[in-house]
Image: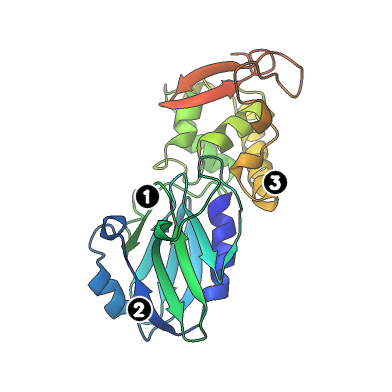
């Protein structure tokens, strides 16, 4: 899970006095955030902790507001030139300095930057997290069951609903359901208690695996998510569907309705 890798990388930015803030792309600043306000809040200050809720990175500022960073599909975090993930699936293979949408420079000469070719992410101050559901990495089986209960929506669409479960993206959802043997088209509220427990078990294991590997694009199913792709478990041709507005790949044999 990329944002968890970015959170760990951001810990290298903690406690370092900030001497300048670079906000060249004002469109990338969301809500009340502005170049002037960020400069006033951060210069002479420092980050004291790095947290994550779902896909949102939260940087706590000493005696100041919280800086929220969203990365979208192509954003990445760089600290002192290091990237915690590497090549993202939907990002260009080349880099360009103009794609550094926001950055801070530290007194020791180091730098932390948000690099986003397609400008799908953003930086905000004191982001509202009240609309986010429990984090997928820490939710219990009962909590997952509650997030699914009573819903006629397709299972995958419910997993992607950040207000119900924060942190599951398109690739992760396909990987979890494939590992769990559950169809993305199943009504979310129709799962049995045993199926919810199985889904919860694979959700936790998948998040752990993909975090350690370096991102959601490194799942076991990933290499076969294309026309003509075959299920890595049983060799069945994969089915392509649109679920929750997202392209989905799944095995019609072991993930049958």
Task: Please give left or right for residue 22 compared with residue 250 in the image.
Answer: left
What crowding class fits label 3: few (fewer than 14 Cα within 10 Å), some (14-19), or many (20 or more)? some
**Can you identify the residue that label 3 sits on?**
209
Q: Quadrant of residue 225?
A: top right
- Say which element carries label 1: loop
Q: Residue at x 49, y 74 (%)?
A: 111
Image position, residue 196 (x, y; %): 60, 31
Image position, residue 138 (x, y; %): 57, 51
Number of the label disc, if any, that sits on residue 119? 1
- Nearer the N terminus, badge 3 or badge 2? 2
**Can you identify the residue that label 2 sits on?**
42
- Say which element carries label 3: helix
- Pick whichever, 243 or 78, lies toward us: 78
Image position, residue 205 (x, y; %): 69, 43
Q: Residue at x 44, y 68 (%)?
A: 59
Residue 44 in view in this figure = yes
- Pick whichever, 95 or 126, lies toward us: 95
């Amino acid at each position: 899970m990329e944002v968890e890798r970015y959170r760990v990388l951001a810990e290298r930015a903690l406690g370092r006095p900030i001497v300048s803030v670079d906000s060249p792309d004002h469109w990338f600043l969301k809500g009340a955030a502005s170049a002037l306000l960020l400069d006033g809040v951060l210069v002479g200050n420092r980050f004291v902790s790095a947290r994550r809720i779902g896909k949102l990175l939260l940087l706590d500022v000493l005696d100041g507001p919280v800086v929220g960073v969203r990365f979208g599909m192509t954003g990445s975090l760089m600290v002192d030139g290091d990237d915690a993930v590497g090549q993202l699936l939907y990002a260009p293979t080349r880099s360009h300095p103009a794609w550094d949408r926001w950055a801070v420079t530290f007194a020791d000469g180091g730098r932390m930057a948000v690099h986003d070719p397609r400008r799908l992410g953003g930086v905000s101050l004191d982001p509202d997290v009240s609309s986010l559901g429990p984090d997928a990495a820490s939710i219990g089986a009962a909590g997952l069951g509650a997030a699914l209960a009573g819903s006629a929506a397709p299972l995958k669409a419910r997993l992607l609903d950040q207000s119900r479960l924060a942190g599951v993206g398109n690739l992760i959802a396909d990987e979890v359901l494939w590992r769990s043997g559950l169809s993305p088209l199943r009504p979310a509220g129709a799962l049995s208690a045993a199926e919810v427990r199985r889904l919860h078990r694979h959700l936790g294991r998948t998040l752990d695996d993909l975090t350690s590997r370096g991102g959601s694009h490194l799942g076991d199913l990933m290499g076969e998510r294309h026309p003509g792709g075959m299920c890595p478990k049983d060799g069945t041709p994969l089915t392509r569907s649109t679920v929750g507005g997202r392209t989905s790949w799944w095995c019609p044999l072991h993930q049958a309705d």
